[in-house]
Amino acid sequence: MTERRTIQIAQPDTGDEEWQAVREPIMTGWLTQGPKVAEFEKAFAERHDVTFALATSSCTTALHLILAAMEVGPGDEVIVPSFTWVASANVVLYCGATPVLADVDPATFTLDPADAARKVTDRTKAIIAVHLFGLCADIDAIAAAAPGIAIIEDAACAAGAVYKGRPAGTLGVAAAFSFHPRKSITTGEGGMATTNEPQLAERMSMLRNHGASISEEQRHHGAHPYLLPEFNLLGFNYRMTDLQGAVGVVQLGKLDKFIAERGKWAGYYADELADIEWLRTPEVPEGGVHAWQSCVCYVDPSESPLPRNEIMDRLQQRGISTRPGTHAVHMLGYYRRRFALASGDLPASRDCDRNSMAIPLHNRMSAEDYRYVAAAIREIASGG
């Protein structure tokens, strides 16, 4: 090993351009949702080849907004993969509906179409397909397995991802994206809901602003800015600020560069670690683009000389941050208790929870950093 380094699991790539971008909303005084958010929405929609993009305060609120606009409610069921961040299931509960947890394909970490089909009932209103870690779920297989069921994309990790030539955000009735600092592009917090359906977009636009019939910007620039709009829906305050929108415009302009750089180094990891039989590096899609929100490997417990957690501990001792890929929702205390779930109910999700390992992959890393990480993993593999 070379001299010890400190390498974070993720780090946003922001700088002077983002710093300068926030000057305009600060100087004009338009800080809440306004022209910069509108500019970000337009650019995001164009980049992802979708008709409507609506910025929100987070991906969680974007996903909730989609379900609310679809009028998902009590008595409805929504199928959700268990191996995902808990927000994917929580939003279903926010609507008073029931999340039905399905298993994942351990090779891709995404929803298993066959298990999703087994969970369909006459109460199923939608399926949330999670594009985990930047790899699109197999949308065609899910649609074939559950015909007629609306598919919603949880594209939190998937800005810029492509599935069989089609951009993430266009694969279902609607999609939700995240701009959390661990994602490839960031606005601090923030999200985006996309759809090609005009009525759904109109309803989401009203719901994110307390149910108002027009936005604050439309009212401000209209003939009667002193009059309040109509409120015909029970809505939420899910707006993005113009400070975030200004940063988002800059970050979006860097998205393709960020993905290309991450893809290059993910390929480096795959090559450098290929001879470690107990470590499986991520799959790369055919005819698509992996967005590389993170590089999540699988530690085969039957072959590995050490448990996953001990490998993570040894990497931490070398200054290398790692994380589990994510958690299995059915193993979390609230869901275990409320739905009487056991870890063995969804075995693939359980195994991914126990054995997935995200290693550093972000746009602040140097070539030396990547070589250091790969060398450290090889050293552990050889008994060091």
Image (cartoon, rainbow, N blue to C red):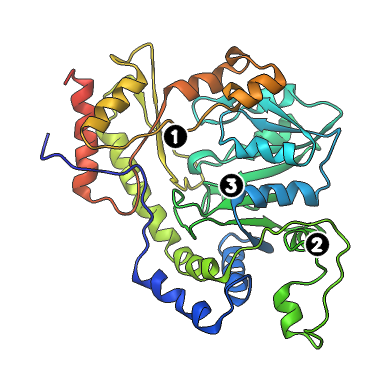
- Closer to us: 189 or 344: 189
- Closer to us: 232 or 357: 232
Residue 70 is left or right of residue 217, and the answer is right
Residue 248 is left or right of residue 319, and the answer is right
Q: Residue at x 81, y 48 (%)?
A: 70
Instruction: Estimate how packed mark 1 is, as few (under 14), some (14 to 19) or many (20 or more) residues with alpha carbons within 10 Å.
Output: some
- Closer to us: 88 or 252: 88
Q: Residue at x 79, y 72 (%)?
A: 214
**SS class, disc 3:** strand
Q: CA distance from mark 2 to mark 3?
A: 25 Å
Q: Residue at x 50, y 69 (%)?
A: 249
Instruction: Estimate how packed mark 3 is, as few (under 14), some (14 to 19) or many (20 or more) residues with alpha carbons within 10 Å.
Output: many
Among the two numbered marks 1 and 3 on one chain, the one whose residue lies closer to the N terminus: 3
Front: mark 2 or 3: 2
Residue 273 at x, y percent in the picture:
27, 30
Residue 238 is left or right of residue 324, and the answer is right
Task: Look at mark 1 in the image and give the residue it sits on.
Answer: 283
**SS class, disc 2:** loop
Residue 305 at x, y percent in the picture:
28, 14
Q: Amino acid at mark 1?
A: Glu
Q: CA distance from mark 1 to mark 3?
A: 17 Å
Q: Amino acid at mark 2?
A: Gly
Residue furthest to the bottom: 223
Q: Is residue 250 above or below residue 165?
A: below
